[in-house]
Amino acid sequence: MSARKMVYFFGGGSAEGNGSMKELLGGKGANLAEMASLGINVPAGFTITTEVCTAYYENNRQWPDGLEEQIWEAMGKVEKVMGKKFNDPENPLLVAIRSGARVSMPGMMDTVLNLGLNDNTAEGLIKLTDNPRFVYDSYRRFVQMYGDVVLDVPHEEFEKLIDAVKEAKGYQFDTEVTAEEWKQLVGEFKALIAEKTGKPFPEDAKEQLRGSINAVFGSWNNARAIRYRQINDIPGHWGTAVNVQAMAFGNIGDNSGTGVAFTRDPSTGENVFYGEYLMNAQGEDVVAGIRTPLPISTLKEQMPDVYAELESIYKKLELHYRDMQDIEFTIQEGKLFMLQTRNGKRTAHAAVRIAVDMANEGLIDKKTAVTRVEPAQLDQLLHPMLDPKEKVEPIASGLPASPGAAVGQIVFNAEDAEKWSEEGKDVILVRNETSPEDIGGMDAAKGILTARGGMTSHAAVVARAMGKCCVAGCSAAVVNDEEKYVMFGSVKLNEGDWITLNGTTGDVIAGKAKLVEPSLSGNFGTLMEWADEFRALKIRTNADTPHDAEVARGFGTEGIGLCRTEHMFFGEGRIKAVREMILATDKAGREKALAKLLPIQREDFYGIFKVMKGLPVTIRLLDPPLHEFVPHEEVNQAEMAKEMGVPVSVIKERVAALAEFNPMLGHRGCRLGVTYPEIYSMQAQAIFQAACQLAKEGIEVIPEVMIPLVGFVGEFEAMKKVVDDAASRTMEEYGVTIKYMVGTMIEVPRAALIADQIAEKAEFFSFGTNDLTQMTLGFSRDDAGTFLPAYVEQQIIEKDPFQTLDQVGVGQLVQKGVELGRQARPNLKLGICGEHGGDPASIRFCHNTGLDYVSCSPFRVPIARLAAAQANIEKPRN
């Protein structure tokens, strides 16, 4: 490691790195280097690479050989550019220490500002600036941050000391605290640190730097950063870079300030300069929500020259990166410094609009536009909004920080949000302001409400990234999180009370408001049309009712890949006939009960075929074991006995007879069809009666009958004969001919291994990856929740295999099944119909493996369309 370059300098119009080096320098470091090379005024600094972070952990949290020498060499370059010297009492250089992973993780890791201050350098800085208030404000900030971040003294302990001074003096804002009072607080902070740690605060600037670099490396594995990585699928082995950068001071006085801005609106995507700033402040003041920031447009009136320069820079950056940028800046005594640029976090609504607008503006092409929106992000656009027809009376309003709507029960801390959510409750997290420690609760909540903070506060930024509805800065909300209630004027809401948030308008409504489902149009429709131009995979849906099918058609489905017939059996008036069939002691009795089900099933299929006219519909014959259709509790068994007109003992005996030690591996799927072929015969008859009736009405129907759980060729042959016989009889009866296919689900590992033999008889395969995962891994999907989280946390597995396909293990069986199946039948139609059909990573695998289609739930169809397009752009099919 020592021979490698570990530290990269930037500043003074040049840089040793560039914007393409995000894996090595992290996003922040790469973009600082890029800005410096573009001639933008960036305070000089250097970046310690992500490789050093990895080595630090591998070496028992020790620096690799040669790092210290490279740091001081780079510091010398910074000193030369800035005209100051680190740890010099006469002309001190102060620095900021910031993290920088290769992807943005806002607020998840640690920062230390104003490093290099001690009693000697503070006096030197006072002589240089003639501004003791600025110096002691900066000094107390540094001691507080260093104490919190490096020495683990709780942030709140320092705030208590500040609040005591403000209360004694009658101050409302930190800006009212005098230089002498800040100086006194610096002493009190140091005493607090000595009391809590048993050691004095380090006065040596070099020791301060070492401690802060280690703290930033350490923060890569703090609880909130780990949780954020889990939520956003960021690998733990990436590590973070550390950026050491000369300070630019926004807290010198009223001609100084700091701000955060976006080159387009991150909530709506509108092409307007959007952001907030505070005068006489440092960066954390803007995002902490302690003071209410001013909109960036006000800066144009307050400091027109600075605003004009900022406007010129943001336009230059957006043109250079060809994407919406999130920028941070500081104004030091009228001089503008740029501290950061990165591709801005945005809502799904904004992402779609920005992608389409930029393509229409000629900044990017259509193909790039399609890659600019994360498929999973589209979920945000496919969730409920407030019903515009319903009149609601807001009890308060705040800032519309993240759009959408949410209804839930109030909780006041992250722990309760996670706990209540695990219990199946919808919750709204209500806080004065959120902090990075709240990340788990924010993820669990349906929406977030904060009393303080602006549009770039922690709550706003994180909620937008998560796609959560958020109302921030609701000043009317007086939150008492200890006694767990919130006041909106005279309205008091307690923990557990229902509340509705409208993140699009900022309104807060007491109680449960009615929500409506969204529809696709405008920019979304345009992006989907572009995605369809680039994808090779067809997208089908899993739908069991005409309503589901209609919803999926609205979202652009190209067929049904899985219609589960068993779901139809639980409807009104149906379950009794199913139970009659189960209680029957002979074939004649079963057929009598099935005759009652036939017209019901026929109507179900008729409705679905009619909605899907001209598109293929894959219908899976009965799959679950029969015990799922009978009650298991005594009270319900008594009800069934009364309904069926038989003694309770008969019900109990039949339930006991149906019981299995492992039902998922038991008497289900085609095994039911083999033992009770009359069940599959009735279902096939219903399918073809519905298809023939519609054909006579002039509606094109494309039925695909799927035999579940096949592991032996003989099983498939026997069941195919049942289907073919029913089709032949029905078509002869109706006097029409229907083209149809009979295929199977590949969900038993053996079926994948003998796929060539099965493909000689089957016309299509659909990989049922839920069961295939279950049987391959030996994990029960109903019980694996007790240990899978620990497997992910301990990195035994990267992701839950029931959410994202295990490509290394289960994926090999899918690939084997594709390869063997197509050897035997080159035109074999291949699809996937497990939950993985809506997962972007799994869709990429399906594309690369050569499947014809994926099938997913209706609301994931747009996600699948976009993911399939991106997969084909990344790796085009021949």
Image: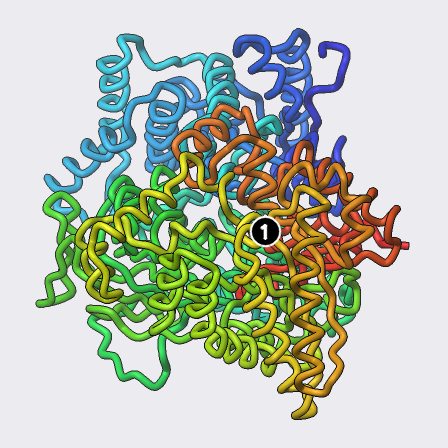
Residue 682, image quadrant: bottom right
Which of the two residues, 370 or 683, is positioned nearer the viewer here?
A: 683
Are there few (<14), some (14-19), or many (20+) residues within 10 Å of tag 1? some
Position in image of residue 721 (x %, y %): 70, 60
Q: Can residue 303 be seen in this view?
A: no
Q: Quadrant of the N terminus?
A: top right
For label 1, the SS is helix
- Residue 806 vs 146, above or below: the answer is below
Position in image of residue 149 (x %, y %): 39, 26
Q: Which residue type carries mark 1?
A: Val
Q: Quadrant of the C terminus?
A: bottom right
Residue pictured at 60% horizontal, 26% vertical? 237
Q: In the figure, is residue 446 to the left or right of 90?
A: left
Q: Mark 1 points at which residue?
A: 674
Residue found farthest to the right: 878
- Residue 682 vs 210, above or below: the answer is below
Q: In the figure, is residue 31 to the left or right of 655?
A: right
Position in image of residue 725 (x %, y %): 69, 68
Which of the two residues, 154 or 766, is positioned nearer the viewer here?
A: 766
Q: In the figure, is residue 1 to the left or right of 161?
A: right
Residue 756, image quadrant: top right
Residue pictured at 50% horizontal, 18% vertical? 214
Q: How many marks?
A: 1
Q: Is residue 551 visible?
A: yes
Position in image of residue 494 (x %, y %): 13, 56
- Residue 510 vs 670, above or below: the answer is below
Residue pictured at 68% horizontal, 54% vertical? 718
